[in-house]
């Protein structure tokens, strides 16, 4: 059986530090720490649960859940992230697709993804670049209806079982939940940050109750955390895959200069 040896969640942008250099530095150092903690656990593969920002998954086709099955990826290059190839892991991805299909989930498989910052920004802090294979799992928060929080939780629970029951003995898996925290994109409220919402999410993660984020409805998250705040589904899933563990807040900044709450939590796996 495989083992989940690491789980952390993090926001996935970096903009110019000029408007708030102290906050930006704390965010950068927090992301750096999260990457280093992951590498210390010596995982064989990273499963990164993220959102896609309408570059690859757009209105032309809108799968609720989509997993990358390629053995190699070339980044899209947005946010100035270099287009350096990194490794995927087809066999791992396809085994998750097969296992979850038996459990009632139909993951769309993608061959031709050019991962955007949702994947590549957190990956930037996992050094050296591309050494550990990465499998992207996209949760579609752009479409309506997006997968419900309870559906996301059920998938996380199933993915955990897939790793523990269907993967080879000694395989070490790191999970990253990528996105959040509160932000409103291209809708009324744009530019606002809700410290109250962000703190609630962080508190649930730190107290070992990240799965309870799934008790919120999509509408409640939209109301309290904005449309971008729906990315906390990815945090919830990463926490749910390591039940019984508490977390530690590595950084949090209500980063109004970047129009979003920025946070990172590592689970004590
Ligand atoms: Fe995002």
Image (spheres, rainbow, N blue to C red):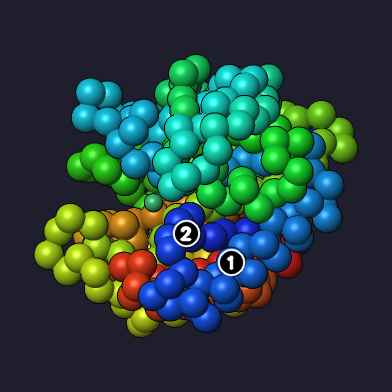
- Residue under label 1: 28
- Residue under label 2: 14
What residue sits 20% from the left and 65% below the top? 190
Count of labels shown? Answer: 2
What residue sits 70% from the left and 49% below the top? 126
- Going from N to C along the chain, the mark reached first, 2 or 1, is 2
Crowdedness of circle 1 by 10 Å Cα count: few (<14), some, many (20+)?
Answer: some
Residue 186 appears anywhere in the view = yes
Question: For the residue with label 1, is its CB less than 8 Å from the closest atom of ligand 1?
Answer: no
Position of 210 with respect to 79 (left or right) is right
**Spatial separation of the CA atoms under disc 2 and disc 1:** 8 Å
Residue 68 lies, with reference to residue 123, above or below; the image says above
Task: Report if the CB atoms under discs 2 and 1 are less than 8 Å apart.
Answer: yes
Crowdedness of circle 2 by 10 Å Cα count: few (<14), some, many (20+)?
Answer: some
Position of 235 with respect to 1 (left or right) is left
Quarter-of-image position of residue 78: top left
Q: What element carries label 2?
A: loop
Position of 80 with respect to 134 (left or right) is left
């Amino acid at each position: 059986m495989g083992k989940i040896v690491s789980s952390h969640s993090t926001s996935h942008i970096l903009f110019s530090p000029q408007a708030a250099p102290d906050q930006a530095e704390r965010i950068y150092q927090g992301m750096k720490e999260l990457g280093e903690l992951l590498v210390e656990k010596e995982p064989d593969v990273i499963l990164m649960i993220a959102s896609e920002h309408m570059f690859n998954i757009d209105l032309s086709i809108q799968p609720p859940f989509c997993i990358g099955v390629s053995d190699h990826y070339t980044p899209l290059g947005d946010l100035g992230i270099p287009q350096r190839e990194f490794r995927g892991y087809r066999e791992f991805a396809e085994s998750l697709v097969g296992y979850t299909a038996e459990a009632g989930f139909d993951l769309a498989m993608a061959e031709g993804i050019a991962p955007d910052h949702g994947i590549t920004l957190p990956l930037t802090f996992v050094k050296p670049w591309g050494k550990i294979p990465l499998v992207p799992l996209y949760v579609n928060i752009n479409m309506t209806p997006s997968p419900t929080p309870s559906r996301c939780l059920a998938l996380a629970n199933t993915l955990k079982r897939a790793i523990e029951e269907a993967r080879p003995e000694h395989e070490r898996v790191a999970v990253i939940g990528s996105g959040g925290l509160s932000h409103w994109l291209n809708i009324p409220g744009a530019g606002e940050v809700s410290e109250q919402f962000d703190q609630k999410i962080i508190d649930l993660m730190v107290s070992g109750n990240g799965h309870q984020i799934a008790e919120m409805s999509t509408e409640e998250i939209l109301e309290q955390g904005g449309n971008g705040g729906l990315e906390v589904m990815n945090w919830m899933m990463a926490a749910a895959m390591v039940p019984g563990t508490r977390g530690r807040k590595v950084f949090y900044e209500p980063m109004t200069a970047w129009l979003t709450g920025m946070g990172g939590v590592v689970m004590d796996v």
